[in-house]
Amino acid sequence: MDYSIKIGGEAGQGIQTIGDTLAKVFSRSGYHVFTHQDYESRIRGGHNFYQVRFSEKGISASRRRVDIIVALDRESITRHRDELSDNGVLIYDAADLKLVLEGDSFLDVPFTEIALRQGSKILANTVATGAVLGMLRVELDIFEKIIDDTFRKKGDEIVEANRRAARAGHDYAVRNCPKCAFIPSQFGRPKLLINGVEGIALGALASGCRFYAAYPMTPSTGIMNYLAGKAKEYGLIVEQAEDEIAAINMAIGASFAGVRAMTGTAGGGFALMVEGLSLAGMTETPIVIALGQRPAPATGLPTRTEQGDLLFAIHAAHGEFPRVVFAPGTPEQALFLTNKAFDLAEKYQIPTFVVFDQYLADSAWTFDGFDVKRIRYRDYRIRGEEWRQVTAYKRHAFTDNGISPLGVPGQSKNLVVTDSDEHDEEGHIIEDAETRVSMVQKRLLRKLPQIRREIAPPLFYGEEGADTLLVCWGSLYGIVKEVVDALANVRKIGMLHFSELFPLPVGSVASAGDIPVPTGVRPETDFLSRLKEAKASLCVEQNATGQFERFFRAETGYAFDHAIHKYDGRPFTVEELLEKVSACLGRLL
Amino acid sequence: MPALDDYYRGKTPAWCPGCGNFAILKAFQQAMAELAIEPHQFTIVSGIGQAGKFPHYVLCNTFNGLHGRTLPVATGIRLVNHEMLVIAVAGDGDCYGEGGNHLVHAMRRNVNLKLFVHDNQIYGLTKGQPSPTSGEGMITKNQPFGVFSEPLNPIALAVALDCSFVARGFAGDIAFLKDLMKAAIRHKGFALLDILQPCVTFNKVNTYEWYRQRVYRIEPDYNPEEKSSAFQRALEWGDRIPTGILYRNDRPLLEERIPTIKDVPLVLQPIATARVEKTILEFY
């Protein structure tokens, strides 16, 4: 069983509500769910869609073929009707859209009329959701529970009206869709459903983040929204800054004052933060930056997806200082890599990055649960009695490992001094060459090898004897994994997925550490030999120039045999990547 | 009670002999001693420029950050630890030019910061370019036809934005400057203290003599709580330049409005990471 549902309509029609609700019903029913969203940079009108896929098997990407289309506008019909599978059905409200479609692939469900009968036009989306569940012959108990939770605050009357609307939509579909032969498998244990930005935000909470400053910018805004909602419960300050320059400088100030701090933005906002990034590097102030890539240059395609800022994240800012760049492939990795980013930022007193994109941000995945025991939290700052006992404190003291004690200003008689100018051990401005050299060695050179040892190798998925390797990074994990599955019977194929990108774990002996590794996937320490021995290697990236490919070659000298680049701002579907990979391998072998 | 010496770092400042900054430093150290605030109890955040070097000559917690970015850093520190006195020290180029946007929004937020601007109406560190407060017509190396723009009036800007405390001091009047610093620190709210400070090397217009002929202390019976008269005084410039507390109000502090830090400073609160297990359940 593997069904996909597409809800299409104009911005403001409520397609996200329908999509979110269906995804929740399926995840609570114990199915594996994957969703992705496609929307325009507007609040009303245009054409958006939300795709929900569910299965009793693990899934990690969207398919092109869909089984049910909910068309809330005419464009959903013209654009997507060809995507229907052989037994697929498109439902629409003929009266609303003022058109009638012939054929048993189309089912007119009078959403509005049914809604009006139950009390209000506003119930139309509940009718539509109920109708989809009716087509699938899914009982309404879980949906009714969601209705109760959603509308409880609005009173019993609203709850009842929505319950009636759901039932009416459901029953209408059961009665009027004889062709609907979808048979979902049996229920399992409820799964959790989470998207990429929620994973990052949860990772921040799990890491003891106390301060988040940002300026709203798609696709990063979801992090700020989620954290603001948790501010009271977690004792967190979320400040909307006047611009991204202020945001990163506020976060740096907060970190200097003694708490874990983070900022988040998209590529354009990060461009403004770059000077502040260098400040964090110079002052050795721990800070975590969530960088949401979107198609650029400049404003680009604001609500769409791309992997175009990898080299920017690695190289941004003037001067030389250590940094760490992660790019999670799943919401689970987003949580645990954000946690690791906080840990490494504070341990080495450096800026660290969680690089993501709109596709990961908005895509929801299901998981059986998260292994919270793997969350690491260690406070590396000196506080309390220990801090009061310190004498002759120097914020930037020269040490064997380059890491100087990180004191909290105000909590002892010791003074905490730091400077964006080159400085001495105390933190005061200097000009002399000798101190400069010692400070670069301390701040940068001594830390680099230690940081590299913290970085886990890429994950390998596929047959052990695989001689064809698909290589990817960040959000492409799920799509490439499914393509490996689809080709497993045809050839010996495997995937190498990099989520800990910088420094590249070359010669690293680190295991996956605390980052959970999904079933069937394992860390590949000797990835370079593996690549060299492969008959064919393909690097798949969502950018035009192959940024990872170039970075990888510069670091290792290894050149991939072939590359697939996509830069239309839309995510791959499984079918699309499968075609491209097959065509490419057909030419290669 | 700390002695004056407790604030001296014992380094000779890298300022030109006769620079107005020496007087500002002296007034500041006196003010801190009289307020009995110990070095570890306050943080100076500075930017870049001659004023940016200020905290290197004072014993205190210090964040000498980027040009123009003093206020965001200071805001971050204050929100995390609102028991810490945080003073931002900047020059006119730093604060009114590069960091203008931050100034506007810091006044809006009304975070309890003290902003001391060393306003010498010129760029010192980069050798003599005009600043946002340079007079119209000032001829410099890269303004051979004179400055075309009107000077920015920081006092009028601050009054218009309802800044919680607005004052002007003069480096040539150390005793009064010290009193203004103390008043700014004691005030509950964002305080802007614009300090007129001659640049003896590059500003040949606004000299000690020029200021002495114009600057006057505001009358003792002046009421800084009246906004319209404050605005009139804010516009006074030229033959007569008022110094003193020009405007004051008791707007609520940002720190007091954030429920998270109502009782205890954020930096002293325990970490609640274990709670995340419960939060994860919300995703089922």
Image: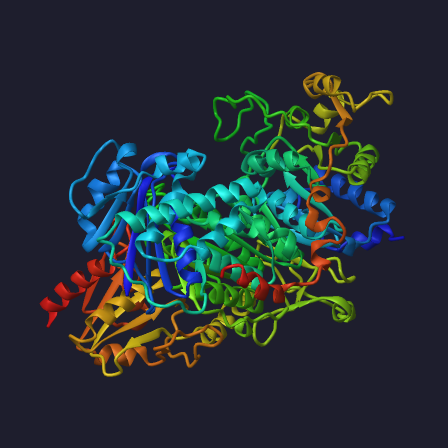
Instruction: Please tell me which residue lies in front, B235 or A260.
Output: A260
In the rendered image, residue B30, in percent from the top left (x then y), is placed at: 83, 44
Looking at the image, the residue that sits furthest to the bottom is: A465
In the rendered structure, the answer to whether residue A532 lies left or right of residue A299 reads left
In the rendered structure, the answer to whether residue A207 lies left or right of residue B142 reads right
**Coloration mode:** rainbow
Looking at the image, the residue that sits furthest to the right is: B1
Q: Residue at x 77, y 32 (%)?
A: B250
In the rendered structure, the answer to whether residue A547 lies left or right of residue B160 reads left
User: From the viewer's perspective, is residue A354 above or below residue B73?
Assistant: below
Q: Residue at x 78, y 53 (%)?
A: B41
Residue A354: name its quadrant: bottom left
Instruction: Please tell me which residue lies in front, A459 or A323.
Output: A459
Looking at the image, the residue that sits furthest to the front is: A175
Circle count: 0
In the rendered image, residue A251, in percent from the top left (x then y), is placed at: 58, 52
In the rendered structure, the answer to whether residue A226 lies left or right of residue A303 reads right
In the rendered image, residue B47, in percent from the top left (x then y), is placed at: 61, 45
In the rendered image, residue B266, in percent from the top left (x then y), is placed at: 69, 55
Q: Residue at x 70, y 62 (%)?
A: B270
User: From the viewer's perspective, is residue A350 above or below residue B176?
Assistant: below
User: From the viewer's perspective, is residue B114 above or below residue A545?
Assistant: above
Instruction: Please tell me which residue lies in front, A76 or B81.
Output: A76
Residue A231 in view: yes
Residue A17 in view: no
